[in-house]
Image: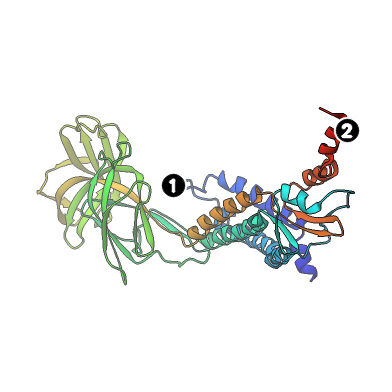
Amino acid sequence: MKLVRIVRSPSFALAVIGFVAVYSAVGAWLPWSSPGGRPAPAWAAALRLDHPFSAPPFLVAVAALLASVLACTWGKRGRILRLGRGELPPTAMCLPPRPGADPGAFLRDQGFRRRGEIWTRCRAGLWGGWVLHVGLLALIAGVLVQQSLFDTGLFELTEGETAKLDAPGALLWRSRGVLARATPPDVEVTLHWFDPYASQEGYARDRLSQLGVVRRGHDPVTAFLDRSAGIRAGGLQFFQAIPTGYAVNLDVPGLGRRSVHLRPEMAHLASIRLDDPSGRPARFLLTAAGSLDDPMGTGPIRVELEQDGVRRALQRGAAFRFGDRDATLLSVGRWGQYTYARAPGMSAVFAGFALVLAGCALLLLPAGVARVEDGAIRAYLVRGGAALAADWTHDPPPGAEDRRLRTEGP
């Protein structure tokens, strides 16, 4: 078919690869590509480029690349099997007969082994190109699935706090593929323990968290987050993010326990602006005698509520007026940031990389198939054809060296 010929042509493949390369280079440097970056402008959102690597142009290009590699791979297995049976292609090289030369002895010296009428060398190497193409297929298909169905988000928790990820406002940031569910996963995550200065064995001192994850239809999971692997729960992975800060934990009648996450302003000051339950603007402030990030301790901490230009100091366990009700300051803690990720195509991506490397290794082998026909040699070699032809042309016939010695003497 004409379409198949176009898709498998080198010009089509080079055009698609060039587009993907340029698109990826530009997309990686867009300021809104990374989590926490500035919002995408209206024109980018209109063109679905607010998330460039899950946008239709990128996915269509990857699908076109997959089709091109598939067209080039199709039928390759059959051709290799025919080669193994000695059915050489028209492109096979032909070494003409040489007087007094033994083609079988020559091929044996070149590392070929005879199987009936067929001579083979490094037979496994014949499959190098096919394995490489299958690896590319797995890799490209994995990328296509991953970028179409991935789902990732960012959230914050303080010790004892539980977040329901699909609740409004639970996520600070979210990115998903065009075919992923519109709503975040129905998962409850609880931070059981958090130390911003602890360290996992084998890693530099950083932070350590213990999360509990509950997802409908799956067993609950409670575990410490591994620095590199995170934890797996219900088809999702959870990881520790870098930012951390202080939280003011309140008991608000009618709203229950609430954790207010403050943002650092100076080394000894953190604050957050919000609306109280009655809708009036308010500001919580936390000041310390020392640096808030000093692992040796901050010194005395003071918590205040600022409203209408008036600051009131809050005491732990004491009630204070918060909007139209009396709230209680329960404690001051630390919050940490966490990410969840659903990556359905990554297994195929890793398998594709492994197959590509295996195919490249096989291509290094000087594989070949040869037949001897009336003193001539017809051979198909993956690599080293020129060297084989040169050796055949310049190789002296068997016994020629002995005759020269007998004639000329020692």
The residue under the point 48% across, 66% down is 180
In the drawing, does residue 168 fall left or right of residue 306?
right
Tell me the crowding category of disc 2: few under 14, some 14 to 19, or many 20 or more residues within 10 angstroms, Cα based.
few
The label nearer to you, 1 versus 2, is 2
Whether residue 383 is visible here, answered yes or no, is: no
Quarter of the picture containing the N terminus is bottom right
> Which amino acid does the dot numbered 1 rest on?
Gly
The residue under the point 85% across, 34% down is 406
Q: Report helix, strand or loop for mark 1.
A: loop
Whether residue 365 is visible here, answered yes or no, is: yes
Q: Which mark, residue 36?
A: 1
Quarter of the picture containing the C terminus is top right
Q: Report helix, strand or loop for mark 2.
A: helix
> Which amino acid does the dot numbered 2 rest on?
Thr
Q: How is the image coloured?
A: rainbow
Task: Give the residue at mark 2.
Answer: 407
**Front residue of this view, candidates 391 and 303:** 391
Spot occupied by residue 321 in the image (x, y as percentages of width and height): 15, 51
Spot occupied by residue 314 in the image (x, y as percentages of width and height): 14, 43
**Front residue of this view, candidates 44 and 6:** 6
Q: From the viewer's perspective, is residue 163 above or below residue 408?
A: below
